[in-house]
Image: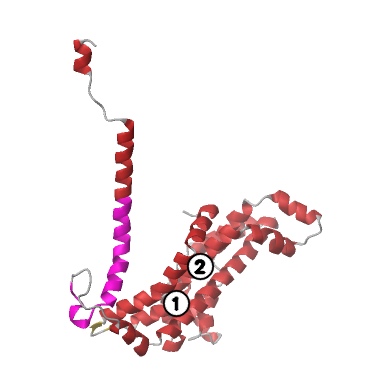
Amino acid sequence: MTTEALRNHRPGRSAPSRGLLRKFGVHAIMILLSLISIFPVYWMIVTSLRPENEMFSTALWPSDPTFDNYLFVLTRVPMLQMLFNTAVVAAATALLQVTTGMLTAYALVQWRMRLSAVVHGLIALSWLVPFQVTMIPNYVLASRLGLLDTLTGLVVPNAAHAFAILLLYHALRAFPTEVLEAARMDGARSFRILWQVVMPNMGAPIASLSIIAFISAWNEYFWPLLLSRRPENSVVQIGLQMFMTQEGNLWGPLMAAAALASLPILLIYLVLQRHVIESFMKSGIR
């Protein structure tokens, strides 16, 4: 090697080393973002375990953990009844949204009518209408039907949703038409095709919609706040408000109630974690 070549030669970092550093940086960022996401949940649990004299402490763990806040929540507020009510409302809402969404989407895809595009556009447009616009008409209708302070009144306004229809509509658009034509040639009618052919092969979109609808209904606050009157007919989000008073917030019981409200969703996710991820990936939801 000549003197000029030696002068121009610079020791470069090997490709494996650069790949290792890049992978380390990506993992470090992911760990940091995970800690940022998890820390509020951790702080909620820690605060729920703090005694009254340590409520505003900045320590990462209470010196004397106690379950008094949980006992206070369960004895002063019908929290278990509210959790049950919330589960019923969320499950019914998810079931109805899947049912109405599937029927509407199937009709729009399979029955080519002149106004199908117009109906699809109106459904998409209704998705953009905020809840506050329809709040008063829904409340008046619920009042006239005698649905105030009932679980049915919490479910009915959300029984059909534009998002559910659009999600299943695009999933049905991608469904193989050859399968549907073969079923028709065998003499199957529309409802039988939907029930026995389409729905068994739409597991991922249906699972994704069910999860989204269930969580959305579980976290609903404003509509139950308008309709609910008695604690025994309320949902868990209204129960959380009971620990927020004009004199000040009861932070210990409030965090304990929030932990109890989050527990069912967390358990569902832990049990169905693999299926949840697969359903979102297969349905194309990001």
Residue at 65% from the left image edge and 65% from the top image edge: 103
Residue at 78% from the left image edge and 56% from the top image edge: 184
Q: Position of residue 110 (x, y in %)?
A: 69, 56
Q: Answer with left or right where residue 111 lies relative to residue 46.
A: right
Q: Mark 2 — residue?
A: 213
Counting other residues with Cα less than 10 Å from the Cα at mark 2, is it few (<14), some (14-19), or many (20 or more)?
many
As for residue 38 lying within the magenta part, the answer is yes
Query: What segment is highlighted magenta in the picture?
Result: 29-57
Q: Answer with left or right where residue 173 lies relative to residue 140.
A: right
- Of the pair 34 and 116, the residue shown nearer to us: 34
Q: Are marks 1 and 2 in contact (CB under 8 Å)?
A: no
Which disc is residue 175 wearing? none
The quarter of the displayed image where residue 116 is located: bottom right
- Magenta portion: prevailing SS class: helix
Q: Position of residue 277 (x, y in %)?
A: 48, 57
Whole-angstrom CA distance, mark 1 to mark 2, is 15 Å
